[in-house]
Amino acid sequence: MRSALCNTIYRFTEHRICCGRIPDWTAHVGQRWDTYDVAPWNLYNVIWRVQNWVRGGMD
C-alpha cells in the first residue's frame, strides 16, 4: 500500500517531491530551526520528512 502511494506521488510530481531542493527560507517558518528530532514542526523539517518518507517507500 505504501509503495503504491509513494509511486503515485512520484509519478504525479516527478522529482520535485522526492529529490527537489528544499528552499532555505523554509528553515525560518514555524518552530525555530533545529534538527528534525528537536524541532519537528519547522517547515524545512516537515518537507524533509515527507521527502524521506516518499523516497523510502518507492519501489
Image: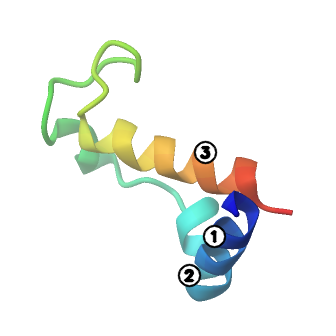
Picture quadrant of residue 9: bottom right
**Image disc number at residue 5:** 1
Residue 54 place in picture, x, y as percent = 63, 56
Give the labeled residue for mark 2: 13
Label 3 secondary element: helix
- 9 left or right, relative to 44: right
Label 1 secondary element: helix
Residue 30 place in picture, x, y as percent = 13, 37
Residue drawn at x 51%, y 57% is 21
Which quadrant holds the N terminus? bottom right
* Dot 1 amino acid type: Leu
Q: How is the image coloured?
A: rainbow
Viewer-nearest residue: 41 or 27: 41
Residue 44 place in picture, x, y as percent = 34, 42
Residue extending furthest front?
Answer: 1
Is disc 2 surrounded by few (<14), some (14 to 19) or many (20+) residues within 10 Å? few
- Mark 2 → mark 3, Cα distance in angstroms: 15 Å
**Image disc number at residue 49:** none
Give the labeled residue for mark 3: 52
Q: Earlier in the sequence, mark 2 or mark 3?
A: 2
* Dot 2 amino acid type: Thr
- Mark 1 → mark 2, Cα distance in angstroms: 12 Å
> Do tag 1 and tag 2 residues touch (Cβ < 8 Å)?
no
Viewer-nearest residue: 22 or 45: 45
